[in-house]
Image (tube, helix red, strand yellow):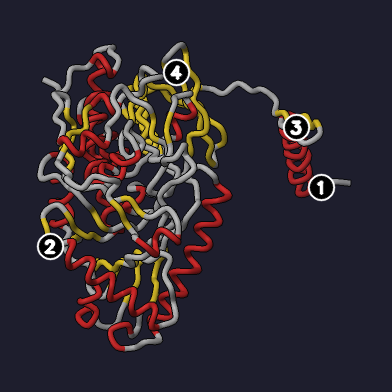
Amino acid sequence: MLTRRHFLPASLTGILGASLSAQAEEKTGTIKGDTCTEPARDLPIKERVDVIVCGAGPAGVAAALAAARNGASVRLIESCGCLGGTWTAGLLSWIFDFKPTGLTKEIADALDQRHARIAEVPDKFTYEPEEMKILLEELCQKAGVKIRLNTRVVAAYKTGTQISTVITESKSGREAWQAKIFIDATGDGDLGAQAGCTWDFGFNNGTVWQPATLNALAIVKDIEALKPHISGGTLKTHLASTELNKAAMQKAGIQPSYGHPTLFHIHDNVVLMMFNHEYDACAFNCDQMTAATLHARREIHAIARALSTLGGCWEGLRIIASAEQIGIREGRRIHGLYTVTKEDLINGTHHADAVARVHFPVDIHAHSKAENDKHALHRGGVDQFKPYDIPLRALIAKDVDNLMMAGRCISGDFVAHGSYRVTGNAVAMGEAAGQTAAYAAAHALLPRDVKYPLT
C-alpha cells in the first residue's frame, strides 16, 4: 500500500519515465548496416534579427559591434565559452597591424585604461587575455549585441541564393535562427561551406597548409634576467631572441618543432610561450585537430620542464595556463566578389571600396618539420612588399547573396592570406562587414548593392 508520502515520488517517476521513454522513441534512428538515419523534425525559429554573426573572434566581435552601433539587431554566436577567439581562448596575447583609427584604436585605448597592455611599437603590443575577455563582453553588451556562447553553427539553409536559416547545437539542443544578413567570422569559413559556397584551402590543391600552434602563459622568477629571450617590437630583436630560446632548448635536450620559439612579456613575471608547430593538422578535421592539441600540450610542457632545469634566467619557469583552443593559421578561404592576390601585395593595390590598408608582410610558416629546419618562415615570393588595400568585395560571398565574411576566411589566395590574416586586419574587416550588414538590412539591400564607404 502506498502512503501519500510515497505516492508522489512514485507517480513522478512513472510520469518522467514514460516521458523519457517517449523522447527516446522519438529520437530513435534507423540503423542500416554502418549508417544511422535520423528522423526528420520541426525546429521552431529561436529568433529573428537583422544580422547574425557566426564566430566571436576579433573579426566577429568587431562585426557585431559595428552592426549594433549602426542600428541593427544582432545575434553573435560563439562555440567557446568567451568572446575573443584566438585573442582569449587561444591565448595569442600578441597583436599585429593594429590601426590607429576606429575600433582598433578604441580597444587599444581601453586596454591602456586598464593598464593591460605593453606596447613598444604603435601597431604591435601584448595584452592580458583576461582583461581582453571582460572588455569585449562589456563593449558588446553596452552596444546591445545578443551573445550566445558554447554554441556551434552546424547547418545553413537557403531560399534561392540567400541564407534563410542557420542551425546551431548546444546544451539547449538543436535550434534555428534567422536573419536578413549573415557574417561568417568563424575563421575556418564554416558557415560559408555549410551554405554551399566554393572555397580554397592551403596551396598545391589543398594538400599543403600552414601549421597550428598551441600557446601558453607561463611565469618565471625574474623577468629582468629573461629580457634577452623576450621578443621586442622589431624583426631584428625578435629573431635574436628566438635564436637564444632555440639554443637554450637544445642545451636542455629539446629540439623544438618551431624554428622561431618566441616569448612575449604580458605583465609582471608572466610571459606568453609560442614554442611549437603542429604539422598536417587540417582545421576542419576534428580527429587531426584533437591529435595536434594533445601532442602540442605535451610538447610545450616538456619544453618548460626542460628549460627550468637549466636554472639561471629559466629558474621557476612554469606553465600556468595552456590555450583552450589551438591557434589555427589556415582554414577555408571563401570565394568572394574579389580575390586578394599575391600581385596586390607586389603592386600595393588601392581600391575605392577599401576596408583596410594592410602593412603586415607575408608571414607563411613552414608546412613541415623538414621545411622548418631549413626556414621556419618564408615570404611566398613577395620580396618587395608594398602596403595594399582589402576591398569590401573580398568580404562578400560570390555564391550566397546575403553572406559576408570577415577575418582570415575572406576571399584571397594563399600568399595574400599569409599577410592579411593577422588580427589587427581582422578587426578592420569585421568593422566594415558589420557596418555594411547593418546598412543592407535597414535598406532591404544585398551587401553587393551597398556603396562603400558608407555616406
Percent position of residue 451, x then y:
18, 17
Residue at far bottom of view: 311
Residue at 32 percent across and 50 percent down: it is: 364
Residue at 27 percent across and 33 percent down: it is: 341
Asked whether the beta carbons under mark 1 and mark 3 sit within 8 Å of each other, the answer is no
- Residue type pointed to by label 4: Ser
Badge 2 density bin: few <14, some 14–19, many ≥20, Cα 10 Å: few
The residue that label 2 is drawn on is 120
Who is closer to the viewer here, 247 or 333?
Answer: 247
Q: Nearer the viewer, mark 4 or mark 2?
A: 2
Q: Nearer the viewer, mark 2 or mark 3?
A: 2
How far apart are the alpha carbons under marks 1 and 3? 37 Å
The residue that label 1 is drawn on is 3
Residue at 36 percent across and 48 percent down: it is: 85
Q: Identify the mark at residue 164; answer none if there is no mark.
A: 4
Who is closer to the viewer here, 78 or 302?
Answer: 302
Q: Identify the mark at residue 202; answer none if there is no mark.
A: none
- Residue type pointed to by label 1: Thr
Hey, which quadrant is residue 130 in on the image?
Answer: bottom left
Classify residue 16 as left or right of residue 417: right
Q: Is residue 441 something one can see in this rendering?
A: no
The residue that label 3 is drawn on is 28
Count of number-bearing discs: 4
Classify residue 178 as left or right of residue 99: right
Between disc 4 and disc 1, whose residue precedes? 1
- Above or below, comparing residue 281 to residue 22 in the picture: below
How far apart are the alpha carbons under marks 2 and 1? 76 Å
Residue at 33 percent across and 67 percent down: it is: 261
- Above or below, comparing residue 115 to residue 190 in the picture: below
How far apart are the alpha carbons under marks 4 and 2? 46 Å
How far apart are the alpha carbons under marks 4 and 1? 55 Å
